């Protein structure tokens, strides 16, 4: 570690950590579900374009702000616009609150994944009552597993950047890829898979300009790259000055999109395989019967129909989901923790337990008032918080920062950047195109 603040020790470490933040339930659950309910391949097509042309430039804005500031989001934004400290606070702190709120609902869903990972083990070991308890939603089960998941997140974050975030991301991300490929190989050998592949890969171009599809695709791209939460500002701040930010950001975007696309190769064919086995998934006109039940009814039904091997597949699948969720949740907790440590001089261990504890309480409140709060917190953070804060980050980088300083930050660690396409178009992108496009999508979604 080259500084007291903590820093990623290697390129690979940063890429795994930032890709770990990006790759999560949003990729493996959210993306395939959105694809299935937005007309299949047309959604995939639009998503790919928006992810690279809008989300990647916005992502770069957050990384550059963080690396320049070498500090938490509030301080980093203040360094860019020293004359606007209140505005910088509102955007930086807003992002931190957004990350904490996302964690409060994400931990509940991740808790479901943990209990679904243990259920097949209980079945195999003949603990039938336990397996039933794990499989059925109840207050007790949800509270226990939400708490457990938050504790796992706290355990990693309390260890800091190199020994916590980096070390665990480097182990968990490759494991995730391995499990994903094994599951795909299995599903593609099953009857019905080819039909699923066709629905996933052959677009109906008449759907491409459907406004609902555009809004969903941009929202999904923002959630997937963890934008508008100050997470990428703080991860950017742990990158050394001699690293090439442009390529680091590109790698992370590529990995994120690749995993979402690959998860689609698993889930969409799996839906058709399940349908071929008699599970009802699509209505007569081809629309998805229910979005929420995809992971908890469709897939378990598919696993059940496989007999004993289904238990192994179910275990692998939900372990995969839990791992993906964990590498994302640690980034959400790092945002408020780094702010508290740097701003109030608290030590990391105390700050992590304190903030993790507060977030656990918020999660419990959501569990107790599930029907009124769960959807509300998701909408508040993902439809309002993330796009707005993401847009303001572009405005900070594009309008409030001296252009030559912005360019100097990009130049650090990237020799010859002046000759790249990135250099020519990115500053314009974050100045005009990104804020406008985000605002457009935002107002559309109102
Ligand atoms: N990108 C994560 C996913 O796709 O599941 C979710 C996420 C992580 C959102 C971190 C926001 C965040 F700050």
Image (cartoon, rainbow, N blue to C red):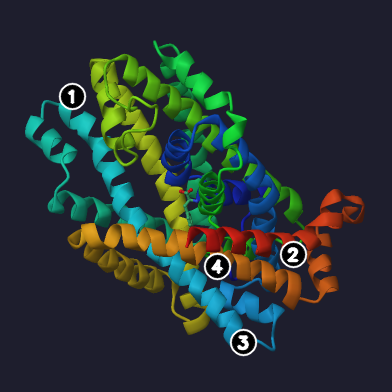
Pair 2/3: label in front: 2
User: Pointer 1: what residue?
Assistant: 124
User: Pointer 2: what residue?
Assistant: 432
Pair 1/4: label in front: 4
User: Pointer 3: what residue?
Assistant: 85
Above or below, 353 against 400 in this view is above
Q: Residues within 10 Å of mark 1 (few under 14, many from 20)?
A: few
Query: In this view of the protein, which residue sits in the foreground, 163 or 339?
Result: 339
Classify residue 304 by image quadrant: top left
CA distance for labels 1 and 3: 58 Å
On residue 388, the disc is 4
CA distance for labels 3 and 4: 18 Å
Q: Earlier in the sequence, mark 1 or mark 2?
A: 1
Q: Earlier in the sequence, mark 1 or mark 4?
A: 1
Residue 96 percent coordinates (x, y) = 48, 70
| Residue located farthest toward the bottom when viewing the structure as drawn | 83
Query: In this view of the protein, which residue sits in the foreground, 319 or 396?
Result: 396
Above or below, 1 against 265 in this view is below
Query: In this view of the protein, which residue sits in the foreground, 391 or 169?
Result: 391
Could you tell me which residue is drawn at 16 percent across and 27 percent down? 123
**Label 1 SS:** helix
Q: Residues within 10 Å of mark 2 (few under 14, many from 20)?
A: some
Q: Are marks 1 and 4 in contact (CB under 8 Å)?
A: no
CA distance for labels 2 and 3: 23 Å
Above or below, 187 against 349 in this view is above
CA distance for labels 1 and 4: 48 Å
Pair 1/2: label in front: 2
Q: Are marks 1 and 2 in contact (CB under 8 Å)?
A: no
Could you tell me which residue is drawn at 63 percent across and 66 percent down? 237
CA distance for labels 2 and 4: 15 Å
Taking 272 as reference, is 298 left or right? left
**Label 4 SS:** helix
């Amino acid at each position: 570690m080259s500084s007291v603040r903590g820093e990623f020790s290697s390129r690979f470490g940063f890429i795994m950590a930032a890709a770990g933040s990006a790759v999560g339930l949003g990729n493996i659950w959210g993306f395939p579900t959105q694809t299935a309910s937005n007309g299949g391949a047309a959604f995939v097509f639009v998503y790919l374009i928006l992810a690279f042309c809008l989300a990647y430039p916005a992502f770069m804005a957050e990384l550059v702000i963080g690396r320049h500031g070498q500090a938490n989001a509030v301080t980093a934004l203040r360094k860019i616009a020293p004359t606007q400290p209140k505005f910088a606070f509102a955007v930086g702190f807003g992002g931190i609150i957004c990350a904490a709120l996302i964690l409060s609902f994400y931990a509940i869903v991740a808790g479901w994944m943990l209990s679904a990972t243990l259920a097949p083990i209980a079945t195999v070991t003949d603990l039938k009552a336990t397996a039933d308890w794990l499989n059925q939603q109840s207050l007790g089960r949800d509270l226990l597993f939400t708490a457990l998941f938050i504790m796992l997140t706290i355990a990693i974050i309390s260890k800091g950047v190199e020994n916590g975030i980096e070390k665990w991301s480097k182990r968990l991300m490759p494991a995730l890829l391995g499990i994903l490929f094994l599951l795909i190989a299995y599903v593609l050998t099953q009857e019905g898979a080819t039909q699923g592949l066709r629905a996933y890969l052959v677009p109906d171009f008449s759907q491409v300009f459907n406004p609902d599809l555009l809004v969903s695709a941009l929202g999904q791209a923002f959630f997937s790259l963890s934008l508008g939460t100050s997470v990428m500002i703080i991860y950017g701040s742990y990158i050394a000055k001699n690293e090439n930010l442009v390529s680091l950001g590109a790698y992370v975007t590529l990995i994120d999109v690749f995993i979402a696309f690959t998860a689609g190769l698993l889930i969409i064919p799996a839906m058709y395989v399940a349908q071929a086995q008699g599970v009802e998934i699509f209505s007569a006109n081809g629309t998805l019967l229910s979005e929420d039940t995809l992971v908890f009814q469709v897939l378990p039904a598919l696993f059940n129909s496989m007999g004993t091997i289904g238990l192994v597949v179910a275990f692998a699948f939900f372990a995969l989901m839990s791992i993906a969720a964990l590498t994302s949740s640690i980034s959400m907790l790092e945002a408020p923790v780094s702010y508290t440590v740097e701003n109030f001089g608290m030590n990391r261990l105390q700050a992590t337990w304190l903030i993790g504890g507060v977030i656990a309480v918020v999660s419990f409140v959501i569990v107790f008032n599930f029907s009124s709060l769960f959807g509300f917190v998701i909408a508040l953070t993902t439809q309002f918080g993330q796009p707005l804060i993401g847009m303001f980050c572009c405005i900070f980088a594009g309008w409030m920062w001296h252009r030559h300083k912005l360019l100097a930050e990009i130049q650090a660690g990237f020799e010859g950047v002046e000759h790249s396409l990135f250099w020519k178009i990115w500053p314009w992108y974050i100045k005009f195109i990104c804020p406008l496009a985000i605002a457009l999508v935002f107002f559309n979604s109102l």
